[in-house]
């Protein structure tokens, strides 16, 4: 029922926004006409290269829909990583007002507040559907925006990659001992878990991964999944492609908006922006699900060797993940508050999905 309410809410918002854009001089609910609404021009910094059309497409979807639903009166121009600021400095640019909004991942900024990791994804956390349930109906977005208020920012879920792959390696990784000393690109709390397993972790934006891997500056790297990884050419620099991406089971990207700029918007424009973010969130996941299987087949045909992480690595990583969460919760009150509420939600939805989804998947995806 909650899911239907969410869809109905988004559809109602889109219909209302479409009516606003088309209404000409007709009065809106608040008595203003669309011709009375201001012309607004914003810039959106992103953490992505334009070549990654699906993940950058989340930003583009927002910009296109906002323009369409306001008849071009409110326009946002998206910029690739590096065009205004580097990909890992989007939040800073939004906070400082260098740009009015950005499209990024909250876990890039755990150095500012470790609890921001939950806004994107955490190891052994929530799938895309579960993450949406937590963000929209489990208090997740409110929890993230309470943190973001310290940075004069408000955020909205605006894309999801689904369960990611486990990264590219130049040599086989069969046990935790094989991870020791490995140089790997991996951000967020997943990177902190890998550090505990002996990995020398580095954080690089997407556009820099291939060269670092190809030139030997790193031994392994993860990004998203087959479609984006193929575009980055990672298969040309490493042969072994591991799964599952246990550190990113449902990666949410987000629109980050400067609060001063947000508060200056007419209510109609705010509702349109939120509706556009809903669309971006749903559309990105659908796009990846449609594209990744085809891309994986191409990668395997090109010589990529698909490998599953051993139970040894998976068990060690899960143990290290929850040890990290408990340590962070003991050291940071904000992390503790978010983590405890998130964990309650995780336990509840895991119990439900064991019944309804896992039972189906075990049979339908199995050999029999």
Image: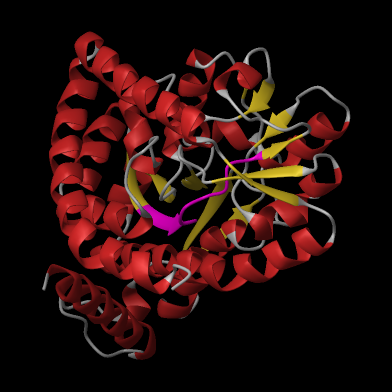
When the figure is inspected, residue 202 is found, relative to residue 283, above or below; the finding is above
Residue 209 vs residue 258: left or right? Answer: right
Is 88 in front, or is 314? Answer: 314
When the figure is inspected, residue 5 is found, relative to residue 157, above or below; the finding is below
Asked if the magenta segment contains residue 158, the reply would be yes
Asked if the magenta segment contains residue 347, the reply would be no
Is 243 in front, or is 95? Answer: 243
User: Residue 116 at what x, y percent from top left?
Assistant: 35, 31
What residue sits 35% from the left and 70% below the top?
A: 363
Of all residues, the one furthest to the right in this rendering is: 215
Residue 168: name its quadrant. top right
What residue sits 22% from the left and 17% below the top?
A: 329
User: Residue 3 at what x, y percent from top left?
Assistant: 19, 70
Is 58 in front, or is 135? Answer: 135
Q: Give the position of the N terminus as an image quadrant.
A: bottom left
User: Residue 57 at what x, y percent from top left?
Assistant: 58, 63
Q: Would residue 298 be seen by someone viewing this image from the given angle?
A: yes
Q: Which residues are magenta?
A: 157-167
What residue sits 24% from the left and 9% below the top?
A: 331
Of all residues, the one furthest to the top in this rendering is: 331
Q: Give the position of the C terminus as an image quadrant.
A: bottom left
When the figure is inspected, residue 306 is found, relative to residue 193, above or below; the finding is below
Q: Would residue 201 be seen by someone viewing this image from the given angle?
A: no
User: Residue 171 at what x, y percent from top left?
Assistant: 77, 31
Residue 74 vs residue 337: left or right? Answer: right
When the figure is inspected, residue 325 is found, relative to residue 345, above or below; the finding is above
């Amino acid at each position: 029922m909650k899911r239907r309410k969410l869809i109905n809410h988004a559809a109602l918002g889109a219909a209302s926004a479409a009516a606003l854009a088309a209404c000409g001089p007709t009065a809106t609910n608040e008595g203003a006409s669309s011709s009375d609404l201001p012309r607004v021009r914003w810039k959106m910094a992103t953490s992505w290269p334009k070549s990654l059309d699906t993940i950058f497409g989340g930003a583009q979807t927002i910009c296109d829909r906002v323009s369409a639903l306001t008849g071009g009166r409110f326009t946002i121009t998206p910029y690739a990583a590096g065009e205004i600021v580097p990909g890992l400095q989007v939040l800073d640019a939004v906070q400082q007002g260098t740009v009015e909004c950005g499209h990024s991942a909250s876990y890039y900024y755990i150095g500012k507040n470790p609890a921001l990791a939950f806004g994107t994804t955490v190891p052994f956390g929530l799938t895309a559907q579960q993450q949406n349930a937590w963000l929209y109906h489990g208090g997740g977005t409110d929890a993230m925006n309470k943190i973001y208020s310290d940075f004069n920012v408000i955020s909205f879920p605006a894309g999801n990659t689904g369960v990611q792959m486990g990264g590219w390696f130049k040599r086989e990784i069969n046990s935790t001992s094989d991870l020791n000393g490995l140089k790997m690109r991996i951000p967020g709390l997943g990177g902190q878990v890998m550090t505990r397993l002996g990995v020398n972790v580095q954080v690089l934006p997407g556009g820099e991964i291939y060269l670092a891997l190809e030139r030997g500056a790193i031994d392994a790297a993860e990004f998203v999944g087959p479609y984006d990884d193929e575009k980055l050419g990672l298969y040309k620099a490493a042969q072994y492609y591991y799964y599952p991406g246990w550190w990113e089971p449902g990666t949410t990207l987000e629109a980050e908006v400067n609060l001063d700029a947000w508060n200056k918007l007419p209510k109609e424009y705010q509702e349109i922006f939120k509706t556009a973010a809903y669309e971006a969130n749903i559309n990105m996941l659908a796009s990846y699900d449609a594209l990744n299987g085809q891309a994986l087949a191409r990668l395997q045909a090109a010589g990529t060797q698909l490998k599953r992480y051993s139970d040894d690595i998976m068990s060690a990583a899960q143990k290290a993940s929850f040890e990290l969460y408990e340590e962070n919760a003991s050291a940071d009150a904000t992390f503790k508050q978010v983590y405890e509420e998130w964990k309650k939600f995780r336990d509840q939805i895991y119990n439900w999905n064991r019944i309804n989804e896992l039972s189906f998947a075990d049979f339908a995806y199995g050999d029999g």
